[in-house]
Image (cartoon, grey):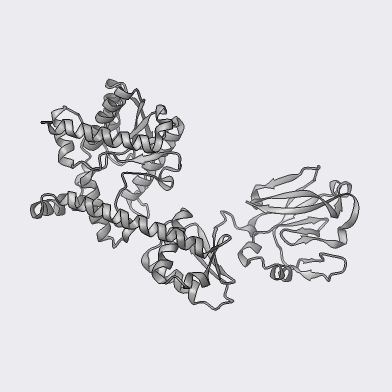
C-alpha cells in the first residue's frame, strides 16, 4: 500500500505532466519557474518540482520577490538563496516597491507587484510555465472570501488549475499553473515534516486585520468541526462554478458575434437579448479589453446611461482606462489618451519624399500617397509644414465645385464620431489649412492630373 508521500508525489507528477503535455510541451526545454517565497507551500512545491525535473532533465528556476514589507524580508531572501544553492537550482530575487497607501490595500498592491515581477523574470529567461503553490485550502479560502464580497459566478469560480494571466503577468506567453490545487494544507505539512524541508514563517499570515487571515484562523477551524471535508466540498463547488462560468463565457462570445458591428456594439441588437445577457456580454467585453471589472452597481449605472438616453444622444462614460461612448445607437470603447490633445504643441517639419512619417505626439502617421488630385511633389518639398491640433474656426473647400464649409459641418456629413474629432490633426502650410485628417485636402491648393501629385492620409494608432 502506498504511503501518503508517495501518493502526493505521484498525483503531483501526473498533474504537472498533463499540464506540460497539453499546454507547453514544445517549449518546456527552456525550463519551469517557481514562485518561491520560502514558506511551507512553496518550499514543498520546490522540492517536488526539483525531483520531477531531475528525472526529465528540465531546468528549474526559483524566483523570489522581495516586497520589503517585513523586517525579516532580507533574511527570507537569504534563506531561499541558500536552499537553492544547496539544491543546485537557479535562483533569482527581485525587489519591488509596495505602497502602504495603495488604494486597493497592501495585499492587493503586493500581489500586483509580485506577479508583474514574476512575469518579467519569466520573459527574461523565456520560460513558458510558472508554478505557484496554491492548494485546496487556499481554494476554499478564496471561495469564502469572494462570497463575503458578493462576487458573481466568475469570482466564485476560484482559481483555475492553469490559465494565462496577461493582466497579472504582463505577458500572454507564460502559463500560470497550480499543480497542488488538489492537495490539502495538512498533506503539504506532513510531506515537509517527513522530508525535513526547511521553510520560513511569514508573521503577516497571522495578522487578523486581513480578511483572508481571519477566515483562515477563526472561521475555517469552526467549519472543520462541522464538516471535516469542507475544503473538498468547497473545492468541488468551485469546479461546478468554473463549469457554469465557461458556459457564460461561451454565451457571451455568441452574443458578441450577434451584437458587434465593426468595432462597436449595436444597442438595438443588445435590447433583443435581455438584461442578464447584456450584463454578461458587457463584462466579457470589458475583460477582453483588459480593464477592471465594474461593480454590479456601476454596471447598472452604465447600462442606464447607455440604453435609456435619447436615440440622438452623445453619451460618454469613463471607466478605468476607457472612454465608453454611445453614438448613433452604437457603443464604442476607446482608450483614454495619456495626453490631452489640446496640450500638444504644433510641430513644424519639411517633407523629403517619405512615404509615411510617424508623429508619436499626435498618436498616428501621415501617409504621402501618389494621386491624380493633390499637390505637386516639388511644391510640397519646398514648404515648411506644420501639424497641429484643431484650434477652432478652420474652414475647408474639398473640391472646386463645392462650397467652403466649417470643419464641424464636414465632420457631421462624414459621420465622424464626436470623440474621434478631438484626436484628428490638421496639416498647415504658411498658416493656411492644407489637409484635415479624415476629411480631405484644400482644393485651393490642389491640381488635377499634373505630374507627380501627392495627397495625404492620416492613420491613427
Q: Quadrant of the N terminus?
A: top left
Q: Position of residue 282 (x, y in %)?
A: 45, 63
Residue at the right extreme of this rendering: 450
Give the left or right position of residue 279, taking residue 399 as reference.
left
Task: Return the residue nearer the eye: 242 or 67.
Answer: 242
| Among the 4 quarters of the image, the one containing residue 62 | top left
Where residue 260 appears, as percent x and y from the top left, is: 53, 62
> Residue 255 location, x and y as percent?
46, 63
Q: Residue at x 18, y 37 (%)?
A: 188
Can residue 315 be seen here? The reply is yes
Specify the quadrant of the image occupied by residue 397. bottom right
Image point (70%, 62%), residue name:
390
In the rendered view, tell whether residue 330 sits above or below residue 79: below
In the foreground, 278 or 110: 278
Q: Is residue 413 above or below residue 187?
A: below
Instruction: Please name the residue shown 46% across and 60% down the image.
Output: 254
Q: Is residue 391 left or right of residue 322?
A: right
In this view of the protein, which residue sits in the foreground, 423 or 5? Answer: 5
Residue 144: horizontal and vertical position, in percent?
Answer: 23, 56
Amino acid at each position: 500500500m502506498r504511503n501518503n508521500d508517495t501518493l502526493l508525489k505521484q498525483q503531483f507528477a501526473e498533474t504537472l505532466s498533463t499540464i506540460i503535455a497539453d499546454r507547453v510541451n514544445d517549449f518546456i526545454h527552456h525550463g519551469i519557474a517557481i514562485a518561491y517565497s520560502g514558506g511551507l507551500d512553496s518550499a514543498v512545491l520546490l522540492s517536488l518540482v526539483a525531483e520531477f525535473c531531475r528525472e526529465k532533465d528540465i531546468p528549474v528556476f526559483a524566483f523570489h520577490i522581495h516586497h520589503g514589507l517585513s523586517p525579516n524580508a532580507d533574511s527570507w531572501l537569504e534563506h531561499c538563496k541558500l536552499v537553492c544553492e544547496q539544491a543546485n537550482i537557479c535562483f533569482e530575487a527581485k525587489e519591488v516597491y509596495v505602497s502602504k497607501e495603495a488604494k486597493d490595500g497592501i495585499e492587493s498592491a503586493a500581489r500586483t507587484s509580485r506577479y508583474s515581477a514574476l512575469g518579467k523574470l519569466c520573459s527574461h529567461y523565456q520560460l513558458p510555465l510558472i508554478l505557484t503553490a496554491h492548494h485546496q485550502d487556499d481554494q476554499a479560502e478564496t471561495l469564502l472570501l469572494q462570497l463575503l464580497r458578493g462576487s458573481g459566478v466568475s469570482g466564485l469560480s476560484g482559481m483555475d488549475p492553469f490559465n494565462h494571466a496577461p493582466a497579472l503577468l504582463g505577458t500572454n506567453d507564460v502559463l500560470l499553473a497550480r499543480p497542488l490545487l488538489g492537495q490539502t494544507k495538512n498533506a503539504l505539512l506532513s510531506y515537509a515534516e517527513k522530508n525535513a524541508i526547511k521553510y520560513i514563517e511569514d508573521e503577516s499570515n497571522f495578522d487578523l486585520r486581513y480578511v483572508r487571515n481571519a477566515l483562515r484562523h477563526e472561521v475555517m477551524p469552526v467549519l472543520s468541526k462541522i464538516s471535516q471535508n469542507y475544503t473538498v466540498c468547497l473545492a468541488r463547488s468551485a469546479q461546478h462554478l468554473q463549469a457554469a462560468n465557461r458556459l457564460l463565457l461561451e454565451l457571451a462570445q455568441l452574443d458578441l458575434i450577434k451584437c458587434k458591428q465593426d468595432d462597436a456594439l449595436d444597442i438595438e441588437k443588445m435590447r433583443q437579448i435581455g438584461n442578464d445577457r447584456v450584463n454578461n456580454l458587457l463584462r466579457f467585453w470589458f475583460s477582453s479589453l483588459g480593464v477592471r471589472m465594474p461593480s454590479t452597481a456601476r454596471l447598472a449605472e452604465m447600462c442606464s446611461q447607455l440604453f435609456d438616453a435619447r436615440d440622438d444622444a452623445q453619451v460618454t462614460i469613463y471607466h478605468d482606462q476607457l472612454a465608453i461612448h454611445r453614438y448613433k445607437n452604437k457603443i464604442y470603447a476607446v482608450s483614454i489618451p495619456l495626453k490631452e490633445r489640446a496640450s500638444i504643441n504644433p510641430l513644424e517639419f519639411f517633407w523629403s519624399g517619405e512615404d509615411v512619417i510617424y508623429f508619436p505626439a499626435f498618436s498616428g502617421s501621415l501617409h504621402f500617397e501618389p494621386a491624380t488630385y493633390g499637390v505637386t511633389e516639388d511644391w510640397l518639398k519646398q514648404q515648411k509644414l506644420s501639424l497641429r491640433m484643431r484650434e477652432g474656426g478652420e474652414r475647408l473647400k474639398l473640391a472646386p465645385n463645392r462650397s467652403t464649409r466649417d470643419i464641424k459641418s464636414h465632420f457631421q456629413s462624414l459621420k465622424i464620431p464626436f470623440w474621434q474629432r478631438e484626436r484628428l490633426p490638421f496639416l498647415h502650410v504658411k498658416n493656411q489649412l492644407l489637409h484635415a485628417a479624415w476629411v480631405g485636402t484644400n482644393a485651393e491648393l490642389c491640381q488635377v492630373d499634373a505630374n507627380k501629385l501627392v495627397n495625404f492620409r492620416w492613420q491613427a494608432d
